[in-house]
Every structure is written in structure tokens, then in C-alpha cells.
Image (tube, grey):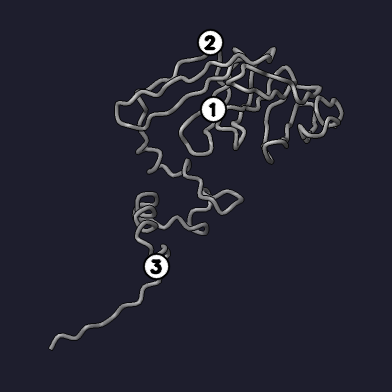
Amino acid sequence: PFKMTTLNVNCAFNPDINDILFDRELYGHHHWSRDRYPRYWGFSDALNVGGIESMVDRLERSPAVLKCHHGCVNTVRWNSNGTKIVSGSDDTHLGIWRINFQFGGESKLLSRFSTEHDANIFHALFIPHTDDDEIISAALDCDVRYNIVSKQISKRIGTHDGACHKLDIIDVHTFLSCSEDATVKLIDTRDKTTVNSTTA
């Protein structure tokens, strides 16, 4: 007679079918554990996909090229729902694109926005809850600017004593900027003491 046995296997993956398929697609037949493959893991619990050769080897170069700038492009960032990107360049302009993910579809340049930065834009971010119409930018000219695309307005809301390289958004009114002047500044557009301040 046929005897049925049950084998209990400790599975490292979530039993949910979507997670199983995602794990199989990402990890292949290997479980990229932190202990076994420490070089693929950073300080957080996130897997560094860029370090996995099998993943990188499967990437393909896109035939689509987005042309908008006349200088080096220093920053490209997605909006919150992944349908648009903003790019910033040495030409002091921002490019706002609607991205088409359909095969053979063309992405559309929505705006080539002229900021009032005097030098290379290093970082630009869509401000959340503004329908992707408002963008914060930082540049070599030491300034942080609040840009409203539909109104063609670019106003300085912060400045440093050195080139401003990175930004972070806390909420629609509050931003962080960091600079070569060894400072990190908190800018709150509701508090005039933090706007255009030259002190840390």
C-alpha cells in the first residue's frame, strides 16, 4: 500500500504567492541571507540589489533618451506615484517629464523650467501634496529655491555659505538642506526666521 508522508520544510520566503514570485524573480534559486552574502547588505535591512551580479546582468539599456538639458544632469528624482521625474542640470533648468512605461511609448517633456539659480543644480525634489507643481531645488550658488512650475515662480527660501548639495522634505512646509559650509539647515516656510537665514 502507498504510504503518504508529510515533510515540514523551513521556508525562508513568505507563503503568500505574490511574495513567493517576487522572491523567486529577485533572488533566483538562492536565499541571499545576511550571514551568507554580507556584501549585498548595507547597514539597514534592505538588500543592495545593485550588488547582485545576476540582477545587474539582466538589466537592459533603454532605447529612450530624455533630452532637455544643455549641461551635465546632476539629479533625477521620481514623484510619489512613479509617473513623473524631475531632473536638474548645470544649465540651471529643471526638466519635468511624464514617463510612459508602455512598450514603444514615448515619455513627454511637460516643462523645461527656468529657475533663478545662478549655477549648477545639484538636487531637486517634488514637494508632496502639490500635484507635482511645486519643486524644491539646491545648487552650487548656495541657494535653496521653492519653484512653482505653473506660475513660473522661483523664490529663494534658504541660503548657505557654500554650495548646497542635498535636500530632504519633512512636510509641505518644512525642509532640510546640507552644504559644503558644514551646516544642515531647517527651513520652515511658515517661520520667517528660518527663511533665507545665513546662520546654522
Crowd class of label 3 (few under 14; some 14 to 19; many from 20; radius 10 Å) = few
> What residue appears at the point 47 percent right and 36 percent down from the top-left corner?
82
Q: Residue most toward the bottom?
A: 1
* Among the two numbered marks 2 and 1 on one chain, the one whose residue lies closer to the N terminus: 2
Query: N-terminal of the two: label 3 or label 1?
Result: 3
Separation of marks 3 and 2 at Cα, in angstroms: 52 Å
On screen, residue 174 above or below 98: below
The numbered dot on residue 157 is none
Q: Is the residue under label 1 in contact with that under label 3 (CB below 8 Å)?
A: no
* Residue 188: image location, x then y, percent: 77, 35
The residue pinned by badge 3 equals 11
Whole-percent x and y of residue 123?
A: 63, 26
Estimate the x, y position of residue 43 in percent, counting from the top left: 61, 50
Label 1 Cα neighbours within 10 Å, binned few <14 / some 14-19 / many ≥20: some
At label 1, which amino acid type do we have?
A: Val
Q: Secondary structure at mark 1?
A: strand
Q: Is residue 28 shown above or below 3?
A: above
- Pick whichever of labels 3 and 2 is earlier in the sequence: 3
Residue at horizontal 39 percent and vertical 54 percent from the top: 23
The front one of 56 and 64 is 64
- Residue 5 place in picture, x, y as percent: 25, 82
Residue 40 versus residue 69 in the image, above or below: below
Indicate the amino acid at tag 2. His
Question: What residue would you read off at disc 1?
Answer: 76
* Badge 3 amino acid: Cys
* Residue under the image location 49 percent in, 39 percent down: 81
> If the image is split into quadrants, where does the N terminus sit?
bottom left
Question: How many circles with numbers are drawn on the protein?
Answer: 3
Left or right: residue 142 compared with residue 9: right
